[in-house]
Image (tube, rainbow, N blue to C red):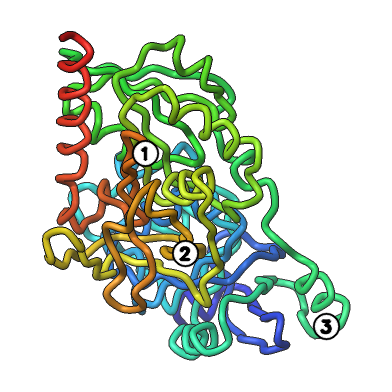
Amino acid sequence: MSIFDQSKKAYLMLADGQVFEGRSFGKEGTVIGEVVFTTGLTGYQETLTDPSYYGQIVTQTFPLIGNYGVNKEDNESAQSYVSGYIVREWCTAPSNFRSEGNINKFLEKNNIIGICNIDTRRLTRTIREAGVMNGVITTEDVYADKDELLRKIRCFSVKDAVKSVTASEPRTYSPNESKYRVVLFDFGYKRNIRQELVKRGCEVIVVPAWTTADEVKALAPDGIMFSNGPGDPAENTVIIENIKEIQKLGIPIFGICLGHQLMALANGGKTEKLKYGHRGANQPVIDLESGLTYVTSQNHGYAVIGDSIDPAVGHVSHINANDKTCEGIRYTASNARTVQFHPEAHGGPFDTSYLFDEFVETMAENTERAGE
C-alpha cells in the first residue's frame, strides 16, 4: 500500500457540479476558492508563496511536484497565500542538496488544504474550455449536502485581496553600497523584486499599498516600483487615485503585473478578466520595439486592454505572442514603464531581467538632469 492510499479521501468539486475524487494532501479540512492552473515545471515553492495567488486554489499541470523539496531561501513571501493546492502526484522522497523537507510538510505547516491523485489534465482542460471557476477542496463527504456546498461555491468571490497581503508599515532594505533609493509599493510583492533592486545598488523602502504621493515625496526616492499582487485591479479605487498624484512627482516609475494594471487604470485605461489567465514560466512575449520574443514568467487573471490607452498618454510596448493581449506599456506623459510579466522570476526564465537595468539607468539619467 502506497503513502497516497493511506491518506484520507479528498474531493474537489467545481461550480459546474463536477467532482474529482482523490487523496488528502497537506492540511485536512474544507476550503473554497477560485480554481486556476499554472504550467510551470519547476518553481512550485515560489508559486505557493506568491501573494498574487491569494484566494485561489492552484492546480499544477506538471504531473510530479516536490521532487527537489523545499527550503527557506526560495520563499517569495513570509507565508503561503494560496487557498488550496492540487497536484497529480507529490514526491515523498525529494533529492536536492538544498532541500530542507518535503512539500506535504510545507503545506501542513502553512495550513494549506490540498488534494492529490486526481486527473489534473482533465481538470485543466475543463478550465481552458469553460474558463476559471470556483471550487472546493474538502476531506468531508462532498455528497452529503452537495446542493448547499454548490451554493457557497457559486457565491464565492475574491475580495479585499491587496488589503489582505500588503505590509502594515514601511521597511527598509539596504545594499552594502547604496546608489539609489527606490520606494517599492507592496501590493503583494514577491521578495525577488526587492532582491533584484538591492543587488543593483538600490536602497529599497517597502511601503503599504495606500501610501500617498506626499508620503512618497517625503522619502525622497530616485525611483518608484509598483509591485505585483492579487485580485481585480479595478476594485483598488483609492490606490488608483493615489497613483494619479504619484506620477505627477516626475520620479521614474516601473510597474510589474498588478502594478502595470493599476498604472493603466490611473491613466484612463481599462482592464478585463481573461478566460483562464496566464500562469506559468513559459509565456512568450513580443517586444514591439525590438521585434524580439522573450519567454516570461507570468501569474495573472486580468489584463490591460491595449486599445484603451490614450496614445497621448502612452503606447503598448509588449504583447503576448499567443493571444496578443497587452504585456507592457511605455508612458510618454510620465516617466514610467510597466510590464505584465515578471522580469524578476526567481525560478526563471531570466530573459527580461534587463528591465531592472533599464530602470536603474532611467534613475541615473533623471538624477543627472536634476543636478544640472
User: Which residue lies at the image location 54% right of the left edge and 58% below the top edge?
Assistant: 270
User: Which residue lies at the image location 49% right of the left edge and 45% below the top edge?
Assistant: 267
Rendering coords of residue 201 (x, y %) = 18, 22
Q: Is residue 285 left or right of residue 304?
A: left
Q: What is the number of the mark on residue 247?
A: none
Amino acid beneath label 1: Ala
User: Which residue lies at the image location 46% right of the left edge and 44% below the top edge?
Assistant: 263
Rendering coords of residue 244 (x, y %) = 52, 34
- Depth order, front residue of 283/333: 333
| Comparing labels 3 and 2, the label whose residue is closer to the camera | 2
Q: Marks 3/1: CA distance? A: 54 Å
Disc 2 secondary structure class: loop
Amino acid beneath label 2: Ile
| Comparing labels 3 and 1, the label whose residue is closer to the camera | 1
Q: Is residue 26 left or right of residue 15?
A: left
Q: Is residue 100 above or below residue 86?
A: above
Q: Give the residue at mark 3.
A: 146
Q: Give the residue at mark 1.
A: 333
Q: Marks 3/2: CA distance? A: 38 Å
Q: Are marks 1 and 2 in contact (CB under 8 Å)?
A: no
User: Which residue lies at the image location 49% right of the left edge and 41% below the top edge?
Assistant: 188
- Depth order, front residue of 254/71: 254
Q: Give the residue at mark 2.
A: 305
Instruction: Please identify the residue farthest to the front as the structure is shown.
Output: 312
Compare marks 3 and 2 and give the one earlier in the sequence: 3
Q: Quadrant of residue 226?
A: top left
